[in-house]
Image: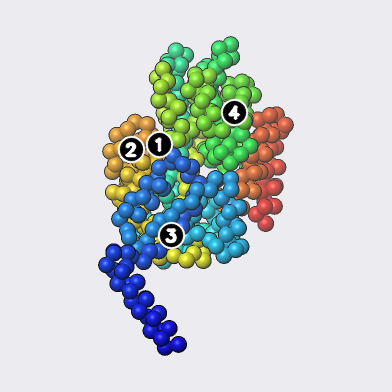
Amino acid sequence: MQKRSALLITLISILLVLSISTGVVAQTTVDVWHYFAPGTNALRWAASEWNESHEDVKIEHRYIPFADLKREVTKAITTNTVPDIIFVDNPDHAQYAAMGALADITEYVEEWGQADKYFEGPWNSTMYEGRNYGIPQNSNTIVLFYNKDMVEAAGLEGPPETWADFREYAEKLTSKEDNVRGFSMCIRKAEDGVFQFLPFLQMGGGDIYDLDAPEAAAGLKLLTDMYQNGWMTPESINFDQSSAMGAFASQNAAMTMTGPWDLGQLEDVEFNWDVALLPYKEDVGIRASALGGENYAIMKGADNVEEAWEFIKWTQRRDFVEQMYIEGGRLPSRSDVAEESNYWRDDPVQSKFLEQLEYAKARGPHPKWPQISNELQIAMQKALTGQAAPEEALEEAAENVESILE
């Protein structure tokens, strides 16, 4: 027994000497799960930069398609095999926090002292019951795109500012004979349809917790009127956001609403276009926009919480975060980056997105957001297709949302 122990000690000593002499360092692996498909650079670039400059901690990321991520996270929780970090679509953050899936990092955040450097909407999406469960990784929002040539040809000037302007532009820019509609948007029965509809609900003076109020129906009445009059692309009730941009890029729609992810479709178009803030309801005066983007979150029960937090914090450095946003084609969640960077400040399109981001609001945040969103989707479809008046559709949704929230 003594000989075996002595032999074991000798072997360990040899291994230690070899590791020191060869420069091998004991390494911790931080696992990150995300849904950024190959070709999306932000996370891959950040992980590569970290791994090149850190020997003791390695970032290993796993791509999981968006539709499968929740199922994989649930499976990991039940089998106690959670990753260290997950990327969370910001409307889902409260749901994960409420189910106890995320680590409460409030103390880490308070010690860090950087919370005031973020836009209010993105930061609020990481909060649940006054505690912090993540850090915004990137943000996005939507603006109005308009065909300047079509607008000028119709005798109109500049973009529509108010809802009254918007309705007038949609009508005058529609030429059914030429297969051109005044406006296209994603308003399908899916989360991205709600994403695009919510600004109209909010600009009318409504909110998701009072859907049967008169103010709540104003935005849906506007869109329903435009759709049923044929001033909106008929396929809008089935369009995703890129398809709506496709109608605009092919000049089958004079205006559309989408985000920076669709700018690539306009690279080779042969017409003049521009962007503007979403038009607002003139007698209410509220500006609003949809908030999209992802948050970092550390899983409760993760093996490497400290290392995971160090990586997240490292990615938020002022100089680094700007480059990460540029590499990933995303908008900054940090207001100081937005205000001080020439990349966004001096570009007329990017600067308009950032101006709109100031009015963007998180969806919810609420742990039952998916169920609430589904009720809105049903109401939207019923109103647009004429199955119910906008007021009736939202009154039914209000009753169902009330049951969900009980």
Task: Report, in whole angstroms, how far the alpha carbon at label 1 lies from the one at label 3.
Answer: 33 Å
Residue found farthest to the bottom: 2
Location of residue 356 by image quarter: top left
Foreground disc of the pair 3, 4: 3
Classify 217 as above or below 97: above
Name above or below for residue 353 compared with residue 256. Answer: below
Mark nearest the camera among 3 and 2 is 3
Sequence-first tag of 1 and 3: 3
Whether tag 2 and tag 1 are in contact, CB under 8 A, the answer is yes
Find disc 4 in the rendering and name its residue: 236
Mark 3 or 4, nearer chain start: 3
Crowding around mark 3 (Cα neighbors within 10 Å: few <14, some 14 to 19, many 20+) is many
Q: Residues within 10 Å of mark 2 (few under 14, many from 20)?
A: many
Please report the residue visible at 48 percent of the width from the left and 39 percent of the height from the top.
289
Q: Is residue 321 left or right of residue 212?
A: left
Structural crowding at the residue carrying mark 1, measured as other residues with C-alpha within 10 Å and reported as few (<14), some (14–19) or many (≥20): many
Task: Please report whichever mark, 3 or 2, sits nearer to the chain's N-terminal start.
Answer: 3
Q: Give yes or no for contact between labels 4 and 2 (Cβ–Cβ under 8 Å).
A: no
Tell me which numbered mark, 4 or 2, is placed earlier along the sequence: 4
> Which label is found at residue 30?
3
Q: Which residue is mark 1?
A: 353
The residue that mark 2 highlights is 344
Seen in the picture, residue 201 relative to 28 is either above or below; the reply is above
User: Residue 139: x, y in percent?
Assistant: 43, 44
